[in-house]
Image: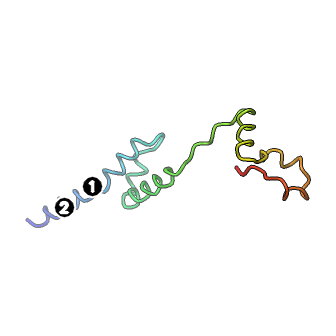
C-alpha cells in the first residue's frame, strides 16, 4: 500500500514543478513548451530571473523640439551638450554644458 502513495506523491510533486513552467511558456512569445518542461527544476528560478531583468527597462525620453531645448537651457543656465563638439577642449571647463 505504501508504494502507490509514494508514486502519487512523486507525481503530484512533479506536476507542481512542471505546471508553472508550462504556464509561463504559454505566455511567452515564440516559446516552446517542450523545452521548458524538460528543465523543470531550473525553470521557475530562470523565469523569476528573467522577470527581474525585464522590470528595470526604462523608456527613452521623447526628443525635444529646438524651442523646448532652448527653454530648458535658459531655465538651467546651461548649453546643450550637442554643441560640445564645436567648442575647443581647452574651453570646456568654462562652459556649463547640459548633462543628459
Left or right of residue 84: residue 7: left
Structural crowding at the residue carrying mark 1, measured as other residues with C-alpha within 10 Å and reported as few (<14), some (14–19) or many (≥20): few
Q: With respect to residue 79, does 5 lie above or below?
A: below
Residue at (71%, 47%) from the top-left corner? 76
Pick whichever, 93 or 56, lies toward us.
93
Residue at (89%, 50%) from the top-left corner? 87
Q: With respect to residue 41, does 85 lie above or below?
A: above
In the rendered structure, find residue 16 and report the number of the disc placed on it.
1
For the residues carrying marks 1 and 2, which lies nearer the camera in this image? 1
User: Toward which corner of the image does residue 15 lie, by quadrant?
Assistant: bottom left
Residue 47 image point, x, y percent: 43, 54
Residue at (74%, 49%) from the top-left corner? 98
In the rendered structure, find residue 41 and report the number of the disc placed on it.
none
Pick whichever, 68 or 43, lies toward us.
68
Extreme left residue here? 1
Residue wearing tag 2: 9
Residues under labels 1 and 2: Cα distance?
Answer: 11 Å
Amino acid at each position: 500500500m505504501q508504494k502507490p502513495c509514494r508514486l502519487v506523491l512523486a507525481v503530484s510533486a512533479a506536476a507542481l514543478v512542471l505546471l508553472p513552467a508550462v504556464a509561463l511558456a504559454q505566455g511567452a512569445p515564440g516559446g516552446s513548451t517542450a523545452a521548458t518542461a524538460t528543465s523543470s527544476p531550473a525553470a521557475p528560478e530562470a523565469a523569476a530571473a528573467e522577470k527581474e531583468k525585464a522590470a528595470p527597462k526604462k523608456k527613452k525620453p521623447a526628443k525635444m523640439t529646438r524651442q523646448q531645448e532652448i527653454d530648458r537651457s535658459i531655465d538651467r543656465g546651461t548649453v546643450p551638450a550637442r554643441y560640445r563638439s564645436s567648442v575647443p577642449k581647452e574651453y570646456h571647463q568654462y562652459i556649463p554644458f547640459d548633462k543628459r
